Image (tube, grey):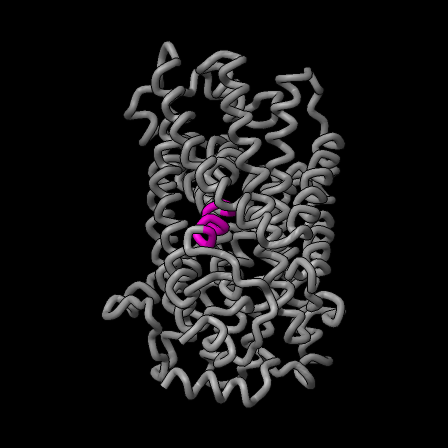
Amino acid sequence: MTDEERLAQLGYKQELHRKLSGFSNFAVSFSIISILAGAITSYGIAMTAGGPLAITLGWLFVGVMVILVALAMAEICSVYPTAGALYWWASALAKRNRAAWAWFVGWFNFLGEVAVTAAIDFGAAITTSAFLSLTFDMKVTTGRTFLIFLVIIVAHGLLNTFGVNLVRMLSDVSAWWHLVGVAVIVGVLAIVPDQHKPISEVFFEVKNATGFTFAGASVYAVLIGLLMAQYTYTGYDASAHVAEETHDAAKAAPRGIVMSVVVSVIAGFLLLVAITWSIQDYEAERKTDLGLPPAQIFIDAAGKNTGTFLLFICVVAQFFCGMASVTANSRMAYAFSRDGALPGSRIWRQVNPRTGTPTNSIWLCVTCSSLLVLPSLWNNAAYLAATSIAVIGLYIAYVTPVFLRRRSPDFRPGPWNLGKWSAPVGWAAIVWVGIICVLFVLPTASPVTASTFNYTIVAVAVVLGGAWVWWMVSARKWFTGPRQNVPESQEKQATTSSE
């Protein structure tokens, strides 16, 4: 069965241009995970909460749990390779109230996608500010960082507007840039520094600068510090969102989901060990005026010129990462609008006939992400909150279809499946997501003030509450879940040809 026939079976005609290879599909997710973005920009979170133990062994532990989530998602993606992805899966797998499941999963997915785009590009702005400070002596200020963020996210909107061919080429380049870049950084930090941190401290030292002093505060700090790894391991649902643009999607998309995580776990571990091994002055580097601890570690360990070059590698990688995130975000918004779920859906579901891209959805996502970052101008914890919102929003959307699949005895596995391992992998993934949804809404600093308050719970509650009110007042009367747009005769033809 061709990709177009499989898509017709799911009820959709081919509108987006199908030009992505299996490697390009992997590259989009790998670029959004971006160990040179998430792990670098959120490194300070774990330096403050947990220290080296949370950074290195915490990365591996969270990585194993995320692989389980990715495996469970990939099995479902193989059966339903559509841009709607998570909310579409929820509708297909639910026994009852299919429209409601699709509605709420879709809104969590949309929230998570917007938040992860915001966090990636704001993190890129932080890194770029540090780079400009080192190269042009620019003073790092909150206002300048926000301005740089706006420039970056608008550039990502423009690049995505030009068409999927450009996105494909840049995503492929991005994957290689990340792999080669990590190798260069690890090599330099292993060879150049005159002294290294003891290996035992790299893996087992615990730091707690959160302000919490109660009994067990160090353990609490390590758990909070796992946010660094969990946040970095987000966005691999992109392989599913671009499935309608991928050749052999039933195999290539699930493979892209899993391999993007596996490669990130391995390469990220090497990167984080190298950076932590190269720490020269822990507290000075944690509190650096550059606003980015790894930047100061690069400078102190390898000298200003070499350190600035290593930071430049991260700046480029993070630009690629944000571009890929806007790609995935816009496809999700396009698919959700195609089914009438977003306000103004008639506008956001339009596809540019020349470029084959959902141009209006691209700029919707750029605007929403910019609004989410706006509190950074007066709240120092805005970046931390954006990462938490991304994690919770996305992972609830990731695991809900997995939960529904476990309760669906009629599920028929696709060409890519887990066989007898499906049940244990699926339930382990569900339990882990339950844990992190509690963990990352907890206070991250003491004392809790307006500037340190973790507003994750507020943002999640506003979106969930808004979606619930809209559902009860209006949407339940007209939202029926995924709407088919393929002619019935074409759908029957696709079904017949697959038998």
Which residue is rendered at x = 69% and y = 79% of the image?
475
Q: Which residue extends farthest top?
A: 194
Which residue is rendered at x = 64% and y = 47% of the image?
118
Front in this rendered view, residue 171 or 166 = 166
Front in this rendered view, residue 366 or 209 = 366
Q: Main secondary structure of the magenta part?
A: helix
Front in this rendered view, residue 247 or 437 = 247
In reply to whether residue 279 is colored magenta, the answer given is no
Question: Which quarter of the rendered picture does the N terminus lie within?
Answer: bottom left
Q: Position of residue 22 (x, y in %)?
A: 42, 56
Which residue is rendered at x = 43% and y = 73% of the image?
2
In reply to whether residue 25 is colored magenta, the answer given is yes
Q: Position of residue 110 (x, y in %)?
A: 61, 61
Examine the image and state in which quarter residue 471 appears.
Answer: bottom right
Q: Is residue 349 left or right of residue 395?
A: right
Q: Is residue 54 above or below residue 423?
A: above
The residue segment tinted magenta is: 24-32
Q: Which residue extends farthest left?
A: 420
Q: Is residue 12 visible?
A: yes
Q: Position of residue 181 (x, y in %)?
A: 44, 31
Q: Position of residue 467 (x, y in %)?
A: 66, 70
Q: Is residue 115 above or below residue 288?
A: below
